[in-house]
Amino acid sequence: MRIAALRLGHRNLLLLHLWPNLYFGVRPQVPDTLLMGMMWGQGQDKSTLVNTLHDTCEQDDGIEGYGWTMYDARIGGSQTIHDSPGHVDITTHFIKSEDEESWGVQVSARMRPDAPDRVKTAVVFHVALEKAANSDAKSLNCTNAKSEGAGKGIDATACYGTDPALGSFEFHVVGDASNRLVEGPAVKSSQVSEDEVWQAKSVFTKQVLAGAGNQAGYLVDAPDVGNMQFIQMVFEGAFTDCISHTPSSIAAFESSFRKRVNKVFPRAAPFDDVRHAGFGRALLSNLLGGLGFFHGNSKVDYTNATEYLETDPGFWEKATDAMGRATITDTQPASLLSHVPSRPMFPRGFLWDEGFHLLPVIEWDFDLAVSVLRSWLNLMDDDGWIAREQILGSEARSRVPEEFQVQYPHYANPPTLSLLFPILISKVNAARTYLGHPSKYFSSANETSAMLGELYPLLSRHYQWFRRTQAGNFTDLYPRPEDAIMGEGFRWRGRTPMHTLTSGLDDYPRANPPHPGELHVDALAWVGASAQALREVAEYLGEHSDAAMYGQHLHTVRHNLDALHWDPAEAAYCDTTIDVAGEFQRVCHLGYVSLLPLLLGLMEPNHPKLPAVLDLLADPARLWSPHGLRSLSAADPNYGRDEDYWRGAVWMNLNVLAVLRLRDLGRRDGPERARARLLAARLRRNVIDTVYDSWAKTGLFWEQYSDKTGAGQRSRAFTGWTACVILLLGLDLGEVPAGGRRGGASTGGISVAASMLSFLSLILLLVFRRTLSGLGASAMECWRTGGAKGLDRGAYEEVIDLDERDV
């Protein structure tokens, strides 16, 4: 079965993105328009279909594994879904034509080796038009028809619609004559409420159970006008191979993609083999395949209750009471272009994740990175606040417990977007080689200056907001060390005895009970990293007074990291609090918090505290493990206790920063140069081996990894910042002495790497403001031949830019 579609009449649909929380879905980068997706299930009968129907990605729905093997946001890609209970493997190809006037989807499926005879699989395509229920300017209807051009005797379903933002559009679902079609295609047209247009599975299930189908539960053809349309087909057994119908553009893209990934992310020994080539493509593809466009309102507490200042003892209890009394505001709708950390678990934008997401993206597609960065910064309010979690609209809220839906304008998050600006500047200055998609910013200094001139004030406003709202208390109320510079210290708001969610490190242990006089080393380090980034941008733009101000901020941050947070007894950076006697006290829970001054580039090669920080990092009894750096020291009393989220597990975003920072120190003159380089090489190997081994076993990337076994754990299909590991594949740090990962930092390590019958094929083709003439011939026309030619696309009309630091 093929779905082939034709040309677009409006470039808005070229700005088409995946609907990341669906196994397969697409939507334009235009709010309140078209939603399209595919669901499937076992088609034996009504009950089986309803109980096995797959639409949204879920943690535990029986799917063995899934993910993008290739994906490029400008062109498209391929993913495979392994439905073991359904005895079928499904592959989706989503390709935009090189003439930028059409796009298409091909869905193919093959029976698994264990499949019994006469397996039935139901496939349901759903199409919905938002805001169409009471609009004369919007319409959508589907009908069954014979396709004159696709081949004799081939059934086709045609859908037609209009939308003010998209114009007129049309697409066809075309059946292949060789497929064994048991039922359908059948069209069910529905008029649903606006809050149901994104709930295709729920609406379809209700209709089937309510008797919309025949005796077997299959839909009866009932086409009409409706803001939601379902197209159902049921297939039996193994079907004829339809590979000959695959558009040549798919093969051309696959060849081009492999070459481009090898070029942009080259691999150095010992990872320069074919297995790690596929591993690298999967890391990048699943990160890019998590790019989505989101639109909707948010729930925000704008009451600014005095309790939110958190100035009194027991402030967390008083703040909780005030939240219970607060009037919650539904904001005006906003839009966001963002990657998601995890399609099944976290299918929305997270502020502190996105800075890490964009580190590989800026290497691959500079303009896309700029567009995402711009989209995030444009969410900022007049004060400089960006909600740390973007829960936009009812669909996003359906995946979040109610107690976590409200956002608070005094809550911060690590400002990871600042990491990108030094990278951005170094690339436009040609200080670093850029091998990704062609960028408009590299060919025009005016474009670059305009872009930085737009983004710089936004980042500066966010920075000033952070300094103001997360400031520590430096009044006479609380004692501070005499050599500390007053006013340059920060604490995360939103603390409770068990959590500091705003820090991004959730249950990482802090002073307990919380105290209004405490200061957090990671909050200060993030201010320093932001000041460093802003100084570089200000210098580039010729804002010399600003550059001097940020330089002074950076100086005082570095001074106070040592004056406030260095604990001589522990030889580590620690949080501080006020003890029961009213005295200044450092509270040391050694882990990622202790390393952040190093990881964020705030320690120079000759820093007197650097040897002790490297000792901590490299100590197998504390942070070093065979699988990466632990989030919390194994010697800490809280290690592995309670929720055990950031209490020992290995997180790859900060491990990647550690490798890059150690690599940087290993290239600069200093007393720790040789040790830093060796640690970088060993940590690189441990991290890559850990993520690769788990991926080879499970076919998935994970939220975190066990420091004991290296197994992936918590959220599965969590590519997100785990994809940053691709940045390590090409680092040439020299050979690591053999001896196995198990020996810790002193022994280096070498991991032991884990070593159609097609029954459905669909090509989906949209036509906007154009007439279909000869469906089959036109469909093939839109899939241009010519090898990889034309696959280096021009920039999006709206894309994002990151900056690059030589970390």
Image: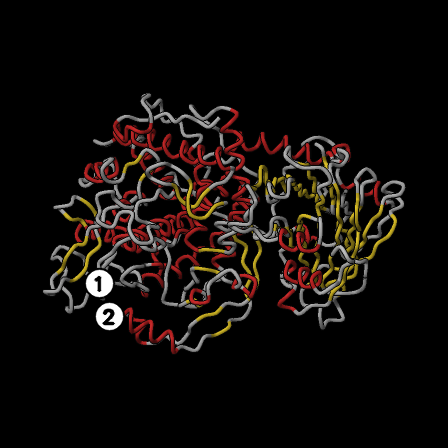
Going from N to C along the chain, the mark reached first, 1 or 2, is: 2
Check disc 2 and report its element: helix, strand or loop: loop
The residue located at (84%, 52%) in the rendering is 771
User: Looking at the image, which is closer to me, 112 or 735?
Assistant: 112
Whole-number angstrom distance, CA of label 1 to CA of label 2:
8 Å
Which mark is on residue 513?
Answer: 1
User: Looking at the image, which is closer to me, 167 or 278?
Assistant: 278
Residue furthest toward the left? 581
The residue located at (84%, 54%) in the rendering is 144
User: Looking at the image, which is closer to me, 75 or 196?
Assistant: 196
Quarter-of-image position of residue 794: top right
Image side of residue 134 versus residue 308, left or right: right
Image side of residue 540 versus residue 275, left or right: left
Is residue 170 in sight in this rendering? yes
Q: Residues at badges 1 and 2 in contact (C-beta under 8 Å)? A: yes
The residue beneath circle 2 is: 314
The quarter of the image holding the C terminus is top left
Check disc 1 and report its element: helix, strand or loop: loop
Disc 1 residue type (three-letter): Pro
Does residue 252 lie above or below 395 as drawn?
above
